[in-house]
Amino acid sequence: MSKISVIGAGNVGATAVYYIAEKNLGDIVMIDVVQGLPQSKGLDFLHAAPLREYRVHIYGTNGYDEIRGSDAVVLTAGIARKPGMDRMDLLRTNAGIAREAAKAVKEYAPDAVIVVVTNPLDVIAMAVLRETGFDPSRVLGMAGVLDATRYCTFIAETLDVWPGDVSAMVLGGHGDAMVPLKRFASVGGIPLGELLDEKTTERLIERTRSGGAEIVGYLKTGSAFYAPAASVAAMVEAIVKDRKTLLPAAAFLRGEYGFSGIFLGVPVILGKGGVERILELELTGDEREALARSARAVRQGIRELDSL
Ligand code: TXD
């Protein structure tokens, strides 16, 4: 049985535990600083097991030592983005939390693959990579799966087709810096360009780009968590089942797409070893330019991280 630890038992963390349990992916440990919170949620999940037919153990604790021997660790601990707050505003607090968590992973789960969710994603992933000293293949960030699933949802709604038949690839940073690849969205293998006109596609891309902000606008005091948690569960499944799934993730680049030393959303093959391969696609001039903009934003974040 695999072991999965989820650090941060808030909205994304707890919902991820829910999806991971429902898929019977492995025993789960939830960690949070708030006394009693992970314990209560862990027990509550466990009570639902007979009805929801999972046979995994779920345990909530405040102690990092419980992550011992984890195969996958999901980092969601941090503060969420508030309306009007830029992702970079979160950096100071969340980098501190991420370093503390990374130190614990290094000590107790030195073979784990770490999926970083905490924002600002690409920069927090860098802080985690530095703190753990892990091979970069074992540290990655969740953002592209979320952007892609939002894009697929909007496409499915517009065309009135089964959402699972839609597939899409996005590159770059999260949200504003997302680079959707129009050429690589398809429905049942048919390229999107055959099914939707350019103007409609642009509209869906725009809605995807601001998908997170749209939800923050409604929620006011927090950010999206169901689709982010589902994205986390998909990544955890790829890792613990060694599925070799092709999906977009923030991976550490060493020359791919012309960038080095930063995390950026790219297509990867995800398996037991983490990022087992990065796929390099031939990009158009516009796509390359958009990716470069995204990379500049990440570099700026890393400069801020360095200045903390
Ligand atoms: O696409 C993406 N990557 C994202 C990222 C999509 C959605 C949310 N995104 C980010 O994830 C968001 O901006 C936040 O940085 C994290 C977590 O979002 P969530 O909505 O789950 O926030 P919550 O509900 O506030 O939960 C955070 C929990 C909360 O229970 C805190 O008590 C806990 O983190 N926390 C800690 N746990 C362990 N250790 C420490 N130090 C700690 N500090 C806070």
Image (spheres, rainbow, N blue to C red):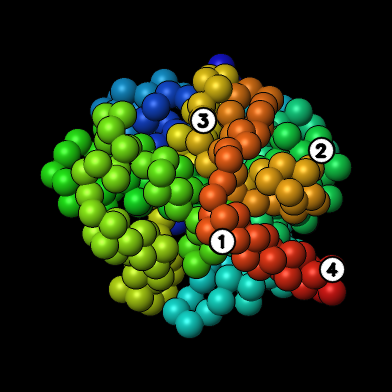
Can residue 40 be seen? no
Image quarter hosting the C terminus: bottom right
**Residue picked out by circle 3:** 246
The secondary structure type at the circle numbered 3 is: strand
Q: Residue at x 61, y 33 (%)?
A: 279
Q: Nearer the viewer, residue 137 or 236?
A: 137
Specify the quadrant of the image occupied by residue 124.
bottom right
Which one is in front in this view, the residue at disc 1 or the one at disc 4? 1
As shown in the figure, which amino acid type bears the numbered disc 3? Leu
Which one is in front in this view, the residue at disc 2 or the one at disc 3? 3
171 sits to left or right of 15: right
Q: Nearer the viewer, residue 222 or 227?
A: 227
Could you tell me how far apart the alpha carbons at marks 2 and 3 are, in whole angstroms?
A: 22 Å
Q: Earlier in the sequence, mark 1 or mark 2?
A: 2
**Residue situated furthest left in the rendering:** 160
Specify the quadrant of the image occupied by residue 163.
top left
Do the residues under discs 1 and 4 have CB atoms within 8 angstroms? no
Q: Residue at x 66, y 67 (%)?
A: 297
**Residue picked out by circle 1:** 290
Tell whether circle 1 marks a residue whose Cβ is less than 8 angstroms from ligand 1. Answer: no
Residue 306 is labelled as: 4
Rendered position, 101 above or below 221:
above
In x, y percent, where is residue 59? 54, 36
Residue 134 is labelled as: 2
